[in-house]
Each structure stands twice: as structure tokens, then as C-alpha cells.
Amino acid sequence: MLEAGTRLVFMKSGCVMNGTVQGNNSIIVAKTKAPVFKNVKLEGSFKNDKAYLSWWNCDEDITDEIESLVTTFSGTVYLDRAGKMTKPIILNDKKTFKIDGCGNAFCLSNIGGFAFHLKQVNSIEVQNVSFKYVNSNPGTSSHVGALRIAHAGASDVKIHDVSIEGFDNSQYKPCGLDAIQIEGCKKGTVTLIHDVTVKDMVVKGDGKETNGIGANYAISVDCHEKESGKVNIYNCYISNLYNVDENGYKIYEDASGIYLGGAVGKNANGEMTYANWDAYIHDCHFKDVSKRNIKIQGNYVVLCNLYSETTEEFLKSYRNMYVGINGNYITIDGIYGQYDGCIVNISGNYLSLCNMDCTSALCNSKYAHVICLDGTQNAKIEDCKFDNDTYMFIYPTERNLTDASVPEFHIKRCSLNVKNLLYCITNFSIIYNKGVLMVDDSNISLSETYVSNSRSLSEIRLCGSTIRGKARMTIPKENGEPRVIVIESEIIEQ
């Protein structure tokens, strides 16, 4: 045991072997490049600004040495040599956790949990490190991953220049995976994740999608309170995430590239309520991510400059979603590429969908809707191009409406090659003859129906737009009064 404030100095030579060194706000100074510890565990506290894994003369398994560093030092821990981790490292009630992997790769072997599980740590930064699974037996754990971090109070989490790859539990028992999981992202916290790569993650679930078994998430951030902290996720690359059954065959289960989990609870009407995020996800690339590139529960989220691609090996399903959202006040500005399923599926209101140029390979399925808006009363779709023989559905509902409500949808400067552009509502008398569908400066090629079963629609306004194909407009009368259709300088070709 060192006395309070003691400096333990290693000059040109010297090594402590076999035992425990107990610090008390101590400082370690190593003036030699040679290791100074062998089979030594550190306890207590050390106040170095910097500490190094290379201080140890250790074998391939470096779990104990890393644990000594991150539990006792208050400064940045430099993992300046590669190695293998074989058990979880769990930290509780620590002021700081800062590691710099120095560009090294660490093999994760039969971790049976999370490589790093941080509980109630105030300031967190993880950078310049790679995690590669070499054996993915979850053991007794049903929830595994590389990083699991719980915010403590008004804390900051920064994760950047990190890669995680190679998980595959297909030969072992089912489990759930979050490669990176951030918890407790409540008001006052900041979460910054950028330049992260997650790839080749294969999860065997139980087919039930309950209690997280079968979940396969690259990056997940949770907030189950009314207000979240700030979240900024950018420059991330996520590739080859999917689920398998007990025989190793690809199946459709709960996989997502980026997930914002914001379910708060049900209100008096039995409807689920969601957190108000302050979240910005941008400049990310997805390749062969099964089920959803992005899954969001919550309000006030901005998605910008996202790109997707799929290969022939991708598991095609009508339930796949490029973006799947339950929430209001959602802004999408720029999503591109190809995804084999729905492009945008949103259950929510007050939506802005702009600058989308996407294709879907499931063009022959009626479920392959490029856009599906459910429960939406106000939305704008601008500067979008969908060159697919697929569907676009808009489903307003009576939820949260008043007598003064006017459902309004604006399609502007779009080039749409869709089979069915459908504005649909039934049995909701509160908004009869009020809804407005506007199509301005757009080219729409249709093969079936333009508007159908729309008892709430008051006006269809076409301005400077071209409608081609076998389009028909079904505008039923209500109480003997015909619908009002406003047409200005349009060209309609049947």
C-alpha cells in the first residue's frame, strides 16, 4: 500500500512482480520503455493524466491488466498494445472513463456479456479502438455487446473512431446483441457517436422477439423519459447485420443499424407515448442491414444524408424498412440508395420528407411501399424521386383531431413512378370534407389509383404537374355535396 500522494518512479530498470499495488491518489512514473509490472493488480486510486497498458509484461489475455487501469486511474488510459479480452469489465460510480486504443484491435473471446459495462460514470470517451469477436459464446448472458454505457446525471458520452465486427452466436444459445448501447440519455446529457464501423454481426434469436432475445442492433440509444439529452450520430458505416434460426438460415427478426428507443409509457387513452429527442443522425452508410437501417421511437429527430445499398445475398422481405419511425415532428432531408423493402414507414404527424432518391427491389409486392404514413395529418414531401412500380400510402386518422383540424399533404417537385398513390380514410366524421392533397410541379406516373376511399378529402390541387398512366380519381360525395377539385395549368394524360 502506497501512502497518500506517493510517486512510484521506475527509472531505467525495475519491475514489480506478483501481487497487488494499492494506490492512494498516487502517481506512477515510468521512465523506461520496458514493462514495470508482471502479474500485478492495481487497486485504490491513481491520479495520472495518462496510463499505459505497455507498463505490463502480460500474456495474450490482457483483461485483468485493462481492468486494473480503468478502475484505478482518473486520466486517459492508453491501450498501446493489442490482446484478447475474455470477461466483462464492469465499472460503477466512477467520475471518468477515457480509453484510447491507439489504433489497436482487441479480440473478444466468449465474453458472456459486454466487454465494457459502465454504470453511473460521469465523463466517458472511447476512441481509436477495434473490437473483433473471435468466439461468440454468450454463456449465461442473454444480452451481449462491446460497449454498454449508462449516463450518470448530466454526463457526456463520446465514442469515435471505433470498429466492432465478427459476432456470430449461430452455434450457441440465442441472445440479443447491442454492439454499442447508450442508456439513460435523459435531459442534460450529451451523446456523440461518430466514425464508427459495425459489420458482420450475426445473431441467433428464438423467433419471439421478446425481452431482447434476437435483437441485433449496431448502435442503440435509450431514453424512457419525456425529454432526452442531445444525440449526434454521424459518419458511421454499418454492414451485414442479420439474424439466423437454429439451423443457420437467415430469418427475419429484430435487426436495426441505428436505434433510438424512446417508449415512455401509455397515456390515459391507452396510446404509447414517446420521448422528445434532440437527435441528429447524418452522413451514415448502410449495407445489407436486415429489417431496418434506422429505427426510431420518439419525436423531434432529424435524419440527413443517409445512403443505403443491398446485395443479392440480402434477406428481402416486405417488412424491411429503410427508416421505421413512431413519432412526431420528424425531418428527413436526403436519403439515397437502394433498400429491399419500404423506404419510409412513419406512424406520426408533422413530417417533412425532402430530397429522397431511392429504389426498392420489391417492386412486385403491394407491401413494398416507398412511403407509408400512418396517423399523419400534416406532411410535406418535396424534391423526391422514386423510380419504382411500388406504392405510396397516406393514412390520416382521427387521433388528436378537433373540429378545426385540416389534414394537409403537400407533394412538391417530385418525380414519382408508383403503382398507387393512396390517400385513405374511413368512418371519421370529424374531418369530412376538410383534407387537402396538393401536388405542385411534379411528374407522377401511375399504373392504378391516384386517390381512393377518401371520405375526408375536400380538395385535390394540381399545379404545374403531370399525371400519366391509368390513373383515376375516386372522390365520393358526402351528404349530397360533391368534392371540390381545384386544377391549375395541369396536364393529365390517360
Image (cartoon, grey):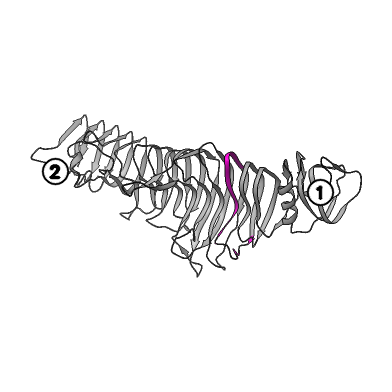
Say whether residue 383 is left or right of residue 127.
left
* Residue 306, horizontal then vertical, whole percent: 48, 41
Pick out the residue farthest to the left: 480
**Badge 2 is on which residue?**
476
* Residue 304, horizontal then vertical, whole percent: 46, 37
Q: Tag 2: residue type?
A: Pro
- Quick check: 203 above or below 326? below
Highlighted range, magenta: 134-159
Image quadrant containing the C terminus: top left
Element class at badge 1? helix
Viewer-nearest residue: 107 or 465:
107
Calculate the distance from the C-alpha at mark 1 to the C-alpha at mark 2. 80 Å
Q: Earlier in the sequence, mark 1 or mark 2?
A: 1
Q: Tag 1: residue type?
A: Trp
**Badge 1 is on which residue?**
55
Does the image show residue 36? yes
Say whether residue 453 is left or right of residue 9.
left
Residue 417 shown in magenta? no
Pick out the residue farthest to the top: 489
Does the image show residue 56? no
Residue plotted at (69% across, 54% down): 106
